[in-house]
Amino acid sequence: MNQFTYLALNVVFMLIAFVTLNLFSRKSPWRTIGFTLFWMLLTTLVFDNVIIALGIVGYDETKISGLLLGLAPIEDFAYTVVSVLAVAIIWTRVTRSSK
């Protein structure tokens, strides 16, 4: 179970971001969030694999789940998910405040 620590931690932060978004906006722009998330995850997939293949970034195999997309551990994608949700939270909050 120790090898899933990062994955479990990432899930916790993704859930916090998801719940926070829904607290700030009852009508979350899910279509826009989904579209943005798709393209950001695709970009992350490409560039993470490039920087790993070039040896710029490496991972201790004992600290990742072992689930890979290409060379990138699945845990790497949580940061993209949380970032997209965080930007959506901030954007929703700022635009609602300015009205």
Image (spheres, grey):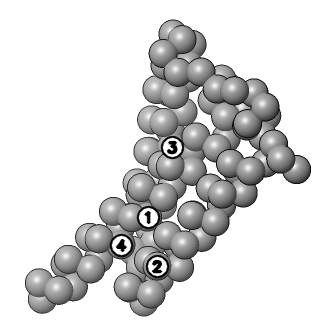
Q: Element at badge 2?
A: helix
- Residue 36 appears left or right of 99: right
**Type of amino acid under label 1:** Leu
Res 67 seen here? no
Res 12 seen here? yes
Mark 2 — residue?
A: 20
Mark 3–mark 1 contact, CB under 8 Å? no
Whichever of labels 4 and 3 marks the residue nearer the N terminus, that label is 3
The residue at 73%/37% (across/down) is: 64
Q: Element at badge 3?
A: helix
Q: Element at badge 4?
A: helix
Q: Position of residue 84 (x, y in %)?
A: 41, 57
Mark 2–mark 4 contact, CB under 8 Å? yes
Q: Position of residue 71 (x, y in %)?
A: 65, 23
Rounded to the nearest angstrom, the CA distance separating label 2 from label 4 is 7 Å
Mark 1 — residue?
A: 85
Mark 4 — residue?
A: 89
Rounded to the nearest angstrom, the CA distance separating label 4 from label 3 is 18 Å
Q: Nearer the viewer, mark 2 or mark 1?
A: 2
Residue in front for this viewpoint, 41 or 13: 13
Mark 4–mark 1 contact, CB under 8 Å? yes
- Residue 2 appears left or right of 31: right
Mark 3 — residue?
A: 41
Whichever of labels 2 and 4 marks the residue nearer the N terminus, that label is 2
Q: Nearer the viewer, mark 2 or mark 3?
A: 2
Q: Nearer the viewer, mark 4 or mark 3?
A: 4
Mark 2–mark 1 contact, CB under 8 Å? yes
Q: Position of residue 92 (x, y in %)?
A: 29, 77
